[in-house]
Image: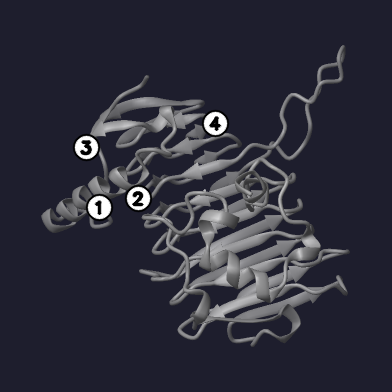
Amino acid sequence: MQAREEQTRIGSRQPWLDASHVTPENLTQWIAQPEKFLSLPLGSNGYVLPSANSLTIVDAQDAPSSRCKLVEKQSKRTNYVATCDTYAPSSPIRLSIYGDARNNVVIFCAHCDVFGELKIYGSGNIVILGGGAVQSSFLTIWLKGDCNLLYWGDRSTSNGTTINLDGAHNSIIVGEDCMFAKATNLRNTDEHGIFDVASFEHLNPPRDVHLEPHVWIGPEALIGKGATIGFGSIVASKSVITHAIPRFSLGAGVPATVKRRGVSWDRPLQPRPENMRKLRSWFEQFEADHRSSCGSELSENSLGFVAER
C-alpha cells in the first residue's frame, strides 16, 4: 500500500494519477491528505495548502470573470478552477487553455492577488497560487507538459516573473514568502532538446526546481532546471542558478556561485529587528520540521551555518 501511494504522488518523479483521474472529488482529498498524494513537502511548514472545505470548484468556463478571466479556450475538455471565498484579486489572471488540454486544476488560495497570464497546453497539471498577499504579483505562466505541479507559496510576490513548466511528472515549488524582482525567469527546461550525436542520448531533460521559503531573486535572474535554493537565501541580479544554493547564502554570477554565507534579507530597506527575530524563530521550527527530508545540498545544523556533507 505504501509503495502504491508513493507512485500516485503529484509532481513526483514516479508515475502518478492519470490525467483522467483529476476530478473535484479527489482534488479535495489530495488537499486534505497532501502527504499521500501531493509532492512533498506541500502541506507542511513553509508550504501551506488551503483547507479542502474552503474551496469552491467549478469548470474553468464557469469561473466568475472577476476572479479568473478565461480569454481563450480552444480545448473542449473539462478543466477546473478552485477558489476560496476570500479570493478577490485586484485584477483577475488571464487564463488560456489550448488544444486537447484536459483535467487541469488551478487553485487560488485565500487572499491571493496574482495577475498576468496562465497558458495551459498540457493535461493533468495542478497549479496552486498562494494567498496572504502583501502586494499584487505579476506572473506569466506557461504549462506545456502533462501531470506537472506548480506551487507558488503564500505571501510570495513578484514584480514580473515568467514561469515555464514542461515535460511530464515534474514540479516547480516556490515556498512561502519568496520575493521575485522584475524580469526574472523560473523554468524546469531549456525549452529545446540537446542530444549526443553519437549515442542520441538526451542530454538536457527537464528537472524539478525547488525554492525553500523566504528566498529573494534579484532582477533579471534565471532559475534553471535542477535548481534548489535554500531557506533565507539571496540571488543577485542577472545571475543564473542551475544547481544548489545553500540556506542563508548569497549566490551571484553566471553560473552562480556562493559569494557569502550566513546572510538573509528583509523587505524594508532597513531590516527590522522584529522581522529578523521572527525569521530566526520561523527557521528554527522549519528546520526541525524538515530535518529528516532535507537534501544534503541544503542541510544546515544551525542558523546561518551550512554543513556541506
Pinpoint residue 269: horizontal percent, then vertical percent: 22, 54
Q: Which residue in the protein does label 3 denote? A: 303
Q: Contact, CB < 8 Å: mark 1 with mark 3? A: no
Q: Which mark is residue 242?
A: 4
Mark 4 or 1, nearer chain start: 4
10 Å crowding of disc 4: few (<14), some (14-19), many (20+): some
Q: CA distance from mark 2 to mark 3?
A: 14 Å
Q: Amino acid at mark 3?
A: Leu
User: Which quarter of the rendering shows the C terminus?
Assistant: top left
Q: Is residue 162 left or right of residue 49?
A: right
Mark 1 or 3, nearer chain start: 1
Q: Amino acid at mark 2?
A: His
> Which residue is painted at 38% across and 55% down in the image?
46
Relative depth, front residue between 91 and 171: 171
Q: Say what secondary structure mark 3 lies in.
A: loop
Q: Is residue 293 above or below residue 178?
A: above
Q: CA distance from mark 4 to mark 2?
A: 19 Å
Query: Which residue is situated farthest in the left direction here?
Result: 273
Q: Is residue 307 above or below residue 282?
A: above
Q: Contact, CB < 8 Å: mark 1 with mark 2? A: yes
Pinpoint residue 286: horizontal percent, then vertical percent: 31, 48
> Which residue is painted at 30% across and 37% down in the image?
248
Q: Is residue 256 above or below residue 96?
A: above
Mark 1 or 2, nearer chain start: 2
Q: Contact, CB < 8 Å: mark 4 with mark 1? A: no
Q: Which mark is residue 214?
A: 2
Q: Contact, CB < 8 Å: mark 3 with mark 4? A: no
Q: Say what secondary structure mark 2 lies in.
A: loop
10 Å crowding of disc 3: few (<14), some (14-19), many (20+): some
